[in-house]
Image: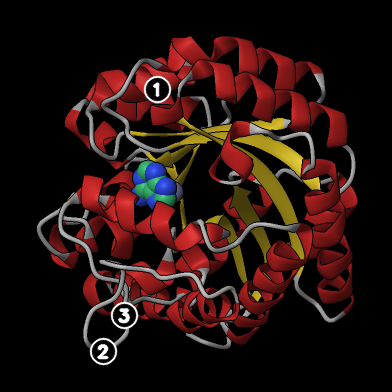
């Protein structure tokens, strides 16, 4: 399915960093990274909390605007290889600078230049500044202000990721209200590690999309509600399998959600962590659920409609 033109709504910039990129940057800075890679140089982690630890350790290598620009370039290059024509990158300033976001205008400016260059070669991108739930609402406010102040260019959304079992979505209401007032699109991770109520709580933030959302399948009334309200799920099946959210590909609820009329889309989350790629996700879905180009075309139409970009760009994606 490499040739299918793809719209990816859920790709963490930091989580998309190839291990070779992180090792190279660490070496340049004479920075030691312990407990991050296995013998074969791949990211190595145990459970989800350990995944977050490794993820944050690897991300700590990437610091200044030039570092982020290089990372974005490596990631967009790979997106192009995978047949992506549009990608939304979840960028988390809270990982960088110890909570001081004052320099992030420069980081975003450097990344926007890279993004503009890749757009010319057919890979459009937008940034969703993403709050980290386990870092708490105060830092999230700073991220939302940063997003609101830079809205209108490459930054078009606000998101919420991190440990779903820490705090409540309503703790982040100020940040999401601030972003909405600035005209930004809104999405939140939910229904990955917790069930239907967690998805409902995230919807109360006024989001139009849910990151993962797959555990909505546990509640038929919520499934109906998602379908009726045309909420788009950013489903990342390979991530769910690798992290043990579902037992295996065949038991993944994506096909059942689609059959129930929910707008499902396909993304990779943090591909090198899960030994996957956007093409592989499509191939696995084709193999396990018999999906063909027509199903993927429908999903990409939904993704284009749910994308946080202007109507002209959306039209070009369809
Ligand atoms: N950040 C990166 N990947 C994530 C995931 N799968 N769930 C929550 N936060 C994340
Ligand atoms: Zn994610």
C-alpha span from label 2 to label 1: 45 Å
- Out of 273 and 41, give the one closest to the viewer: 41
Query: Which residue is found at the position 52% from the left and 75% from the top?
Result: 30
Q: Is residue 295 left or right of residue 190?
A: right
Q: How busy is the neighbourhood of tag 1: few (under 14 within 10 Å), some, or many (20 plus)?
A: some
Q: Secondary structure at mark 2?
A: loop
Q: Is residue 119 left or right of residue 128?
A: right
Residue 191, percent across and down?
30, 34
Residues tagged 1 and 3 counted as in contact (Cβ below 8 A): no
Query: Which residue is found at the position 21% from the left and 56% from the top?
Result: 243
The residue lying furthest to the left in this view is 247
Residue on which disc 3 sits: 42
Residue on which disc 1 sits: 225
Q: Secondary structure at mark 1?
A: helix
Residue on which disc 2 sits: 40
Q: Secondary structure at mark 3?
A: loop
| Residue 48 visible in the displayed image | yes
Residue 148, percent across and down?
80, 27
Q: Is residue 315 above or below residue 193?
A: below
Residues tagged 2 and 3 counted as in contact (Cβ below 8 A): yes
* Quarter of the C terminus within the rendering: bottom right
| Residue 206 visible in the displayed image | no
Q: Is residue 217 left or right of residue 118?
A: left
Query: Which residue is found at the position 54% from the left and 63% from the top?
Result: 61
Q: Quadrant of residue 282?
A: bottom left
Q: Which is more N-terminal, label 3 or label 1?
A: 3
Q: Which is more N-terminal, label 1 or label 2?
A: 2
Residue 96, percent across and down?
60, 46
């Amino acid at each position: 399915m490499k040739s299918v033109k793809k719209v990816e709504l859920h790709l963490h910039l930091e989580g998309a960093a190839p291990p070779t990129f992180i090792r190279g940057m660490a070496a340049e800075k004479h920075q030691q990274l312990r407990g991050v890679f296995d013998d074969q140089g791949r990211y190595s982690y145990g459970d989800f909390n350990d995944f977050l630890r490794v993820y944050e350790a690897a991300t700590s290598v990437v610091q200044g605007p030039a570092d982020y620009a290089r990372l974005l370039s490596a990631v967009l290059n790979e997106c192009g290889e995978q047949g992506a024509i549009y990608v939304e990158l979840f960028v988390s300033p809270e990982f960088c600078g110890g909570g001081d976001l004052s320099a992030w205008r420069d980081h975003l400016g450097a990344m926007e230049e890279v993004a503009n260059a890749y757009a010319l070669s057919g890979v459009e991108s937008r940034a969703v500044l993403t709050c980290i739930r386990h870092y708490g609402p105060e830092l999230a406010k700073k991220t939302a202000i940063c997003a609101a102040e830079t809205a209108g260019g490459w930054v078009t959304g606000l998101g919420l990721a991190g440990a779903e079992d820490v705090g409540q979505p309503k703790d982040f209401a100020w940040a999401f209200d601030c972003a909405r007032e600035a005209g930004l699109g809104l999405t939140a991770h939910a229904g990955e590690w917790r069930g239907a109520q967690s998805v409902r709580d995230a919807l109360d933030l006024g989001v139009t999309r849910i990151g993962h959302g797959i555990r909505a399948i546990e509640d038929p009334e919520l499934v109906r509600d998602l379908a009726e309200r045309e909420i788009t799920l950013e489903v990342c099946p390979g991530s769910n399998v690798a992290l043990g959210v579902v037992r295996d590909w065949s038991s993944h609820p994506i096909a059942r959600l689609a059959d129930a009329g929910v707008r499902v889309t396909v993304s990779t989350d943090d591909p090198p962590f899960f030994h996957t790629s956007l093409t592989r996700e499509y191939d696995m879905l084709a193999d396990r659920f018999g999906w063909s180009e027509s199903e993927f075309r429908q999903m990409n139409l939904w993704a284009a409609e749910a994308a946080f970009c202007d109507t002209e760009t959306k039209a070009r994606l369809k």
